[in-house]
Image: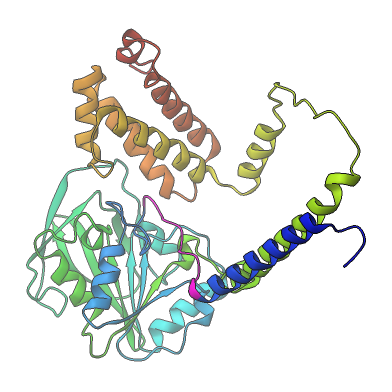
Amino acid sequence: MPAFLDSRDVRYVLGAVVLMVILLGITYAVGPAPAPQSYGYPSTYAADWTGAKAAYLLLKNEGYRVDRWEKSPEELPAAAPGDVLVLADPFEQSSAPERAAIRRFIVDGGRVLAIGANARKLVPDLQAAEAVDYDPETKIYSALLPSSITRSSPEISMTSPDTFTSSPHPWLGLYGKGDELAVITFPLGKGDLIWWAAASPLTNGMIREKNNLEFFLNCVGSPDTAHIYWDEYFHGSRPSIFSYFAKGPVPWAGLQALIAFLAVVFTFSRRSGAMRLPATESRLSPLEFVDTLGDLYHSAHASPAAVGVAYRRFRLALSRKLATPSRIKLPELCRAASLRFGWPEDSLLDTLSRSERAMRNIDLDEPSALYLVRQLHELSARLEPTGRAAQETPAWR
């Protein structure tokens, strides 16, 4: 035994070794860390109103071969009849090779289910425009012609749909209302493309609406032949070298090495260290952190993320203040706030609706994002316990 270790030091080292053995056993019993929750868009990881986790789990329970696709489209396998790529409200930028890979997937015989106006930046020969104003009311669209897509679903419902503009290919309108088209399709090579004006029919909140589920299943095909690749790559879920190691035993091994290092440092330095007074931390709040965070958002062009953080924080605070469920619909939440605080319902709904659209807008400019964040911060300040008069007189009234 080394001379600098006494009996107490030995107990510390033995305790650290036992703890390392326990952690090593846990390494084999614990799986990879769960994927982070998503908000505000139809991700298969999201269990909120606008998420698509229910649709994803339903496909698995019904025997479909369905996989989350978190890699570039360039790594998609060669398409076969029955293969479906779901692009549900994508918002990440794409490269020319990625767009070419999606086109090749369709031409080789696959089907692409493209949803929302942003899908035009990924799929070939599709022109669409985002909805100008957010409309929380549900719209009913009727089938325009008989097909395998409209079978057993004569009507579907959507909220705040985008607008189909044009396509150089001969296309067919499958659902519509007057001059407004909700679903179109056109062939390309051996495959075809189906475009939805909104993701509402497959979201957790509206998949139970009349005919929406049947319509969604018609679009993806039969479970006997369909192999569905549900894209999360363009939702930001992209693997890296760090995520690869994070799913293995490397983090646990690093934790064990850190515990061993701390044990050695503690057993030796508690007698050998110099006697010093504890450092007194300044109670000032330097703005370096704020500047750094602002530069990070600016360099990453993450204006939608900044709006999303402020929006989710305010909505959670408002739900708690009103004692309402966190998944309450936006119009109902605004109505409750108006009744409780006397806030104008229409102005509040407009601000929150614009914030939701901004969260999904990859082309959001910084002045617009700054304006929305300021509005949300002012609303959040009114929820602080600073007196009833301050609560009932919002600055934006």
Q: Report the front residue among 349 and 161.
A: 349
Quadrant holding the C terminus: top left
The quadrant where residue 4 appears: bottom right
Q: Position of residue 179 (x, y in %)?
A: 17, 55
Please determine whether, in this image, residue 161 is positioned above or below residue 23: above
Q: Position of residue 197 (x, y in %)?
A: 27, 59
Q: Which residues are magenta?
A: 29-40
Q: Position of residue 299 (x, y in %)?
A: 66, 46
- Prevailing secondary structure of the magenta residues: loop
Q: Position of residue 76 (x, y in %)?
A: 48, 82
- In this picture, residue 73 sits left or right of residue 201: right
Residue drawn at the location 26% of the way across and 45% of the way down: 327
Q: Report the front residue among 148 and 4.
A: 4
Q: Is residue 113 visible?
A: yes
Please determine whether, in this image, residue 111 is positioned above or below residue 132: below
Q: Report the front residue among 157 and 11.
A: 11
> Does residue 110 belong to the magenta stretch?
no
